[in-house]
Amino acid sequence: MTESTIKLFDEDAYKTEFDAQVVWQCMIEDAESEGLSKILLDQTLFFPEEGGQEADLGTINGFEVIDVQIEKKDQKELIFHTIKGKLNVGDVVHGVIDFEHRFDQMQQHSGEHIFSGTVHNRFGYDNVGFHLSRQSVTMDFNGPLDDDEVRRIEREVNEIIVQNLEIKISWPSKKELEKLEYRSKKELEGDVRIVTIPGVDVCACCAPHVKRTGEIGFLKVISRQNYKNGVRITIECGLRALETLSGEHSLLQNLAKDLTTSLENVPGQVLKMKDEIFMVKGKLQKTNKELMEYKLRDIPSDKENVTIFTDDIDNRTAQDAINALTKEHKGYCSFFIRTDTGYRFVSASSGKDARKIAMVLKEKFAAKGGGSDKMVQGSLDDVAEDEIINAIDMLKD
């Protein structure tokens, strides 16, 4: 088709505009892609989706670039751009990179290298999975890390960042690579691009990076979770991390204001409220149980089917009440608890098949749920109480 696409982002990750020639194009025909076309340029500043990182954003001749993919054919690397518009082969076009997005990706990716390199140096673990998008940055390591270890790594990473170390890009020869110790998540063929942070990390990587570690700003660990015999770490760097922390700080400030306390006292106040809610729930459960016992006493003992509608009842009270009803009544015993959209229900019987209730409610009212011949549970949308009672009373043995 053509020679490999010249990767201008390798020459200067900070450049935002370029000119190129369209060497191939086609319209995308499927119904969901109306107005979209796929083009190949002789050179590009757009970094494609590769190595766990999403593609650059921007425009080509004013048309929005919505996807950039790299395809390897016959030892050639071709970078295809999907745009909202149409261009012609031979057109000389002008591309503009969304540098805010590019720089965010650079901050995150460079921060990830420092974190992964530090983990490798301290624990010997490899980064076996990496994902970088506008929503999240995750790293998967093939060994365990606890919360204290992650906090220490986070501190060390930020101490490295403020040293403002130069991040070096190189293309070692095959002989040089054979002697070089570097991290890589996969077997590599052809020219290998090496990203070096002196004394911290040496890693094969195809993506743009900041020039010096100070441009990362800072790194914050967002979460840690055990994952596939190792650990998954979510991080944010620079302006992205600042936005997240600013939002969380505002939430805490508003919470402290609502609790009429200071920020440092919020955890204690929340624990106190949690204990109070637990006590109130216990008292409410006891009261509901007593009220239900009074209600059950008023039901005639010779009544076969018992269907009760209530506004508020906890699962434990409903369970106890159902058990009591099925001892006294031979038919179907049911509770329908009102919700915002309808009812949740629990039905049981000591001598009949309770699944028949679930079946008739499903047939007549599109209810959801199921269970055993002894007890069924589920939910249904709002229906008149008389219609539900009549449907149950019409059931045949």
Image (cartoon, rainbow, N blue to C red):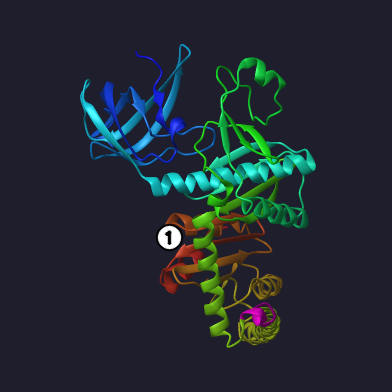
Give the residue at x 55% y 43%.
109
Q: Confirm whether residue 143 shows in the render.
A: no
Q: Secondary structure at mark 1?
A: helix
Residue 73: image x %, image y %? Answer: 44, 15
Tell me: 227 left or right of 26.
right
The residue lying furthest to the top in this view is: 74
Residue 52: image x %, image y %? Answer: 54, 36
The correct choice, above or below, for 396 with respect to 80 in the image is below
Q: Confirm whether residue 388 shows in the render.
A: yes
Residue 111: image x %, image y %? Answer: 59, 47
Looking at the image, how many numbered discs can be counted on the residues? Answer: 1
Q: Which residue is mark 1?
A: 365
The residue lying furthest to the right in this view is: 123
Residue 136: image x %, image y %? Answer: 53, 49
Q: Main secondary structure of the magenta part?
A: helix
Q: Residues within 10 Å of mark 1 (few under 14, many from 20)?
A: some
Within the magenta stretch, is there residue 190?
no
Asked whether 163 or 183 is in front, the reply is 163
Name the quadrant containing residue 175: top right
Give the residue at x 44% y 57%.
366
Name the quadrant containing residue 355: bottom right
Q: Quadrant of the N terminus?
A: top left
Q: Quadrant of the C terminus?
A: bottom right
Asked whether 358 or 21 is in front, the reply is 21
The correct choice, above or below, for 219 with respect to 132 in the image is below
Asked whether 144 or 281 is in front, the reply is 144
The correct choice, above or below, for 296 with respect to 189 in the image is below
Give the residue at x 48% y 70%.
389
